[in-house]
Image (cartoon, helix red, strand yellow):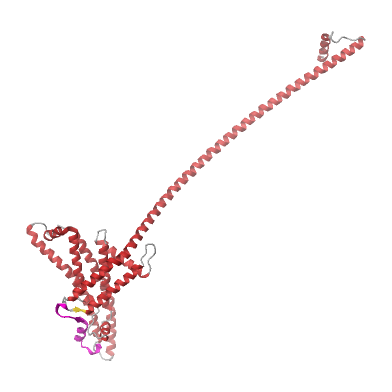
Amino acid sequence: MLQLNATFIGQIIVFLLLLWFIYKVVVPWIADPVNARYRKIAEGLAAADAGQKELAAANTRAQEIVREARERARQIEELAQRRSREEIEAATREAQSESARIVAAGEAEAVNEAARVRDQLRRELGALVVRGASQLLEREIDARAHERLLERLAEDIARG
Amino acid sequence: MAGHESASEFFAHHLTHLTVGSGFWTWHLDTLGMSALLACIVGLLFWVAARGVRVDAAPRGLTSFAEYIYDWVDLNVGDSYQSKDRRFMNSLALALFCWIIAMNAMDVVPADLPSGLAGLAGAHFWRVLPTADVNSTGAMAFVVIIFVIVAGIRAKGVGGFLHEWIAAPLGGNPLLWLPNVLMNFIELISRPVSLALRLFGNMFAGELLFLLIALFTLSAGPSLSTVGLFIVQVIAGVAWSIFDCLIIVLQAFIFMVLPVVYISMAEETHG
C-alpha cells in the first residue's frame, strides 16, 4: 500500500508540467493585467486625491478673490461717493458764485441804466429849460456859450 | 455487482490499483490517468479563465473566479513569503492548491461509480482518488523539497548553504557540527515525508471510511432491515461527504502553505 514505484516518476512529470503551464501561461495572464489594474486604480485614487486638494485650493483662492473684489468694490464705491460729493459741492459753489456774479452784474446794469436815464432826462430837461428860457427871453441862447451855466442848472433840476 | 462480493473482496476491489509493469517499474494507470486528467481540467479551466482577464474591464464568470482564487493565493503566499517577486511562489501554490483540490474532490465520487464504469470498459480496477496513492503525494512533496533546496542555494550560494548545514541551528562550534548535520538531515527528510503522508493519510482514511459506510448494504438481501440499513448508510454517507469536503479543502490548503513556508525559511539566513 505504501510502495513507491514508477508511478512516483510519472506523478513528478505530471506535476512539473502543470506547474510549468501555470507559471508560464496562467499566472502571467492573470497577474499582469490584475497588477496593471491595481496600479491604475491606485493612480486614479491618487489623482482623485490630488484633484480634491486642488479643488480645496481653488475654493480658497476663489474666496480670496471674491473677498478682494468686494474690498475693491467697496473702495471704488467710497471713492465715487467722495468724488460725487466733491463735485456737487464744487458745482454748488460755482453756481452760488455765478448767481452772485449775475446778481451783481444785474445790479450794476440797473444802476448804470438809472444813471444813463437820469443823464438823458437831465439833458432833455436842460434842453427844455433852454428852450423855455429862450422863449421866455425871446431870443436864442447860445447853448455853447452858456453850456456851463446850463449844465449846472440841469443838474440842479435833476437833483431837485 | 457489489451484491456478489464479500467484504474483503469489496475492499480488495476498491483499494487495488490498475497497474502495468512489475517491481519498481509498476505504473498505477488509474493514479496517473486521473491526476493527468484533473491536471488538464485545472489547466484548461485556468487557461480559459485567464484569457478573459482585462486591465480595464470587470472580470466576469469564470474569469472573476480565477482572479479571486489567484488573489487569495497571492495573499496567502504574501503572508509568509516577503520577497517582492512572488510570481513563481504564486504559481507553485496555485498549482498545488488547485490540483490537490481537484484530486481530493474525487473522494466524494460514489465509490462504485468509477470502478463500475472502468469495469464496463474492461478494466478490473480503477481507484479514482489519486491523492490516496502515496506516489502522488510523495511526488509533489519531492518536487517541493527540491525547490526548497534550490531556493536555499540560490539565496545563499553553495558555500552559505553548506555552512548552514553544519553551523545551524545549534551554532558554529566544531563540537556541534555533527548534531547540526543530523538535525538538518532529519529536517530534510521529515518535511517531504510529513507533507506526503499527511495528505495521503487523510485522503486514504476518507476513502476507507466511505468504503466502510458502503458495507452497510453490501451483502444485504431484499428485506425490511435492508431499508433501515440503507437509510443509515445514506445518512452516514452524506455526513461523511460533508465532513470530507472540509478535509479536501483543508489538506489542499496545508499542502499549499507549507511549501511556501519551507521555501521562505530556506531563503532566510540562520546561524
Residue B122: image quadrant is bottom left
Q: Position of residue B165 (x, y in %)?
A: 13, 61
Tell me the residue at 69%/27% (across/down): A99
Residue B44: image quadrant is bottom left
* Above/below status of A90 relative to A114: below
Residue sitting at the far left = B175
> Can the viewer see residue B164 in this picture?
yes
Residue sitting at the far top = A145
Residue sitting at the far right = A138
* Above/below status of B177 relative to B38: above
Is A68 colored magenta in this rendering?
Answer: no
Tell me the residue at 24%/80% (across/down): B210
> Can the viewer see residue B244 in this picture?
no
Residue B49: image quadrant is bottom left
Q: Nearer the viewer, residue B152 or A98?
A: B152
* Above/below status of A115 relative to B220: above
Q: Which span of residues is magenta-colored?
A: B1-25
